[in-house]
Image (spheres, rainbow, N blue to C red):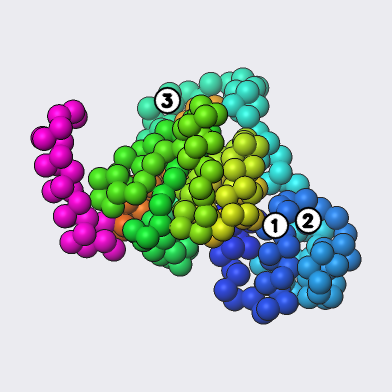
């Protein structure tokens, strides 16, 4: 588990002063933790001993150990497929082959993702996504946009009021111009994090919209703006991060949304099937 995910997981155990340290770290992560103890204390409006008590609660033996963890994590966050490919070249192709690697890696990554997910975060995400008073807009990056589309296709079926953010400027502007407090954005952002997704989160939260973030264990910078953060592991048998655990998480969220909606989901599904037969299309 990454440091940011650990902070969010332990937030409920913290004193009010310690929570200020946590929020200061998450709002400017990881940069806020790479300066001095005094600088972090000033940013958090607490004393230096409060910062150290907070780090002790997280399990760190002191500030140097905490910073080492941040630097190690920062290196991992910035890793690219090329970095992973070159590392594999140096060590050689594993003799067992892709299929055994996948069989060993992917199930463990899925199980770890679901086991590490705080129940409170899942409940909060489901509560928001099942709220039919909120209009849901999903968006992702070059690859993670596929997950956003997958989520929206399910939400269209079971609750309606859901859409995928268009990529063309005119359609995108038209969709965003009226964003407000009745909007919920499901954003997907994984390393290496995409600046347009962060800019979008800043804009919509500034207008009162809420954000549910799907990300990796190092946490996208969007985490500092999100109402709910749902991290996934990304271990993979190849040089590319895997979205298999993230897909499992999306399907878990969809199942929980259906459970929360109850008969409303069934009514919507019946209406969708009837409309499909009436208007045609698959």
Left or right: 200 as drawn, with respect to 281: right
Q: Main secondary structure of the magenta part?
A: helix
21 lies left or right of 155: right
Q: Is residue 225 magenta?
A: no
Label 3: few (<14), some (14–19) or many (≥20) C-alpha neighbours in 10 Å? few
Marks 2/1: CA–CA distance = 8 Å
Which one is in front in this view, the residue at disc 2 or the one at disc 1? Answer: 1
Query: What's the magenta region?
Result: 258-282
Residue highlighted by disc 3: 98
N-terminal label among 1 and 3 = 1
Q: Disc number at residue 32?
A: 2
Are the residues flagged by discs 2 and 1 in contact, CB closer than 8 Å?
yes
Is 255 located above or below residue 16 in the figure?
A: above
Is 264 a magenta residue?
Answer: yes
In terms of secondary structure, where does tag 1 sit?
helix
Please state the horizontal and vertical placement of residue 52, each as a whole percent of the image: 79, 71
Task: Mark 1: give few (<14), some (14-19) or many (20+) Cα within 10 Å.
Answer: some
Name which of mark 2 and mark 3 comes first in the sequence.
2
Looking at the image, tell me whether mark 2 or mark 1 is earlier in sequence order: 1
The quarter of the rendered structure image containing the N terminus is: bottom right
Q: Which residue is mark 1?
A: 27
Residue 27 lies, in percent from the top left, at 70, 57
């Amino acid at each position: 588990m990454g440091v940011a995910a650990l902070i969010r997981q332990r937030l409920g155990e913290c004193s009010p002063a310690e929570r200020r340290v946590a929020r200061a770290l998450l709002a400017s992560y990881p940069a806020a933790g790479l300066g001095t103890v005094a600088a972090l204390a000033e940013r958090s409006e607490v004393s230096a001993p409060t910062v150290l008590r907070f780090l002790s609660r997280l399990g760190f033996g002191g500030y140097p150990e905490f910073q080492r963890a941040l630097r190690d994590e920062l290196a991992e966050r910035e890793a690219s497929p090329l970095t992973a490919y070159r590392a594999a070249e140096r060590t050689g192709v594993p003799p067992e082959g892709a299929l055994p690697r996948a069989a060993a890696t992917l199930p463990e990554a899925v199980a770890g993702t679901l086991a590490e997910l705080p129940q409170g975060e899942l409940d909060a995400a489901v509560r928001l996504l099942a709220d039919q008073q909120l209009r849901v807009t999903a968006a992702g990056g070059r690859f993670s946009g596929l997950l956003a589309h997958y989520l929206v296709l399910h939400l269209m079926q079971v609750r309606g009021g859901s859409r995928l953010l268009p990529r063309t400027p005119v359609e995108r502007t038209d969709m965003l111009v009226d964003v407000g407090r009745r909007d919920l954005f499901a954003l997907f952002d994984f390393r290496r994090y995409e600046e347009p997704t962060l800019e979008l989160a800043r804009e919509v939260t500034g207008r009162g919209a809420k954000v549910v973030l799907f990300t990796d264990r190092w946490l996208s910078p969007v985490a500092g703006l999100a109402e709910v953060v749902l991290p996934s592991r990304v271990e993979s048998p190849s040089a590319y991060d895997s979205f298999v655990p993230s897909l499992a998480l999306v399907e878990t969220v969809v199942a929980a949304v259906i459970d929360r909606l109850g008969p409303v989901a069934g009514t919507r599904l019946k209406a969708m099937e009837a409309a499909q037969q009436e208007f045609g299309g698959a």
